[in-house]
Image: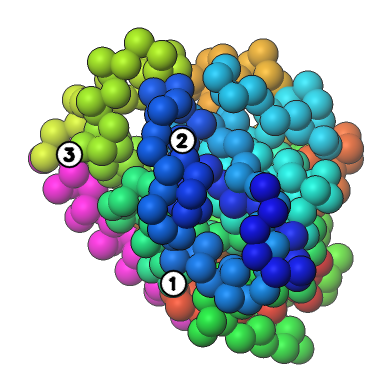
Amino acid sequence: MDLGGTGLRVGVKDSIDIEGMPTRLACPCFADAPLAERHAEVVRALLVAGCRIVGKTNMHELAYGVTGINRWTGTPVNPRAPDRVPGGSSSGSAVAVALQLVDFAVGTDTGGSIRIPSACCGVYGLKPTYGRVSRSGVHPAFSSLDCVGPFARDIPMLERAMQALDGSFHPQAAPAHATVGWVQVQANPEVAAAARGALEKAGISVRSMTLPSLEAAFAAGIAIIGAENWATYGHLIACDALGSDVRARLLTAREVTSADVHAAEIVREAFRAEVDEALTQVDALALPTMPDYPLTLVAAADARAALTSTSFVRQFNVSGHPALSLPVATAGGLPAGLQLVGRRHQDEALCALARSIA
């Protein structure tokens, strides 16, 4: 595949429509999907910017999983740790960037699906403010959590990618002085030390903070994504070829009630206000992207362990704040990430802060 100009080489996740190509979401149930009739709005934007789309990238089936393991399309190999998961759902986008097959890649993030693979593969990934980047032509067609965003090997390229995806994005100068709130969470001490060490090395002022509703917001995110994915993909449980892990998640999602969703929406509003209030005191919030190192391919068979990988990310899909994962060096040499969370609609300031840390 080679579409567009002679500019930056880009990979596009297979949940995003490209005219004349099928959008299969790496799911065998869509093996015979019709050709997309038009480009997704972000694809049109990339082409207008002169980018060269060199391929569609692999993903966790239906974008409903965080390991990136896919028994139909194959699992992209994590270049930083081949015996560990690449992360999902935007696995192929992260791997393509890490392997320098593209200058940047486009993924989607409903519950960590850009930030998790970024941390696993040692690259940079941004989940923009909810609604900042168009989802027209992106699957599923409706989501109150999902965001389209870029992966890159450095922050300047991440910012160039955002400029291509969103014409209103204009990079800012790095702040002369910045203070971040270190969110108190339970994480592998080596991972936490690496993430916090990156801040201290950059001379960023750090103050300790808590987000009391963090656990409730995690549960709310699970309920909302479950209800929305069941509404869109529930019919696929009749498809024999559906992956067993995705089938199990859909069957669990079927049990989410309207009362559960209503309760989750109340938590969403409260948590959004909580994060907004915290961000009046600091320039950004900071915490590890994941509570531990990427799961080994063997350990990833445990669905509970896989879900735990998202313990610090899906809350910011619920609240809608922009969140960015930066790779950090750990004592053991395994990949890990530092997550920064910024004020809503101030994605430029978040990227500028990340640039000063990177």
Q: Residue flagged by tag 3: what amino acid is it?
A: Asp
Checking the image for residue 132, the label placed there is: 1
Mark 1 residue crowding within 10 angstroms, few (<14) / some (14–19) / many (20+): many
Q: From the image, state whether disc 1 or disc 2 is nearer to you.
A: 2
Residue 164 shown left or right of residue 223 in the figure? right
Q: Earlier in the sequence, mark 2 or mark 3?
A: 2
Could you tell me which secondary element the residue under label 2 belongs to?
loop
Q: Mark 3 = which residue?
A: 260
Residue located 37% across and 61% down the image: 136
Residue located 80% across and 48% down the image: 101
Marks 3 & 1, CB-CB < 8 Å contact: no
Residue 242 shown left or right of residue 157 in the figure? left
Residue located 65% across and 65% down the image: 4
Q: Residue flagged by tag 2: what amino acid is it?
A: Arg
Q: Mark 2 = which residue?
A: 24
Magenta residues span 259-286
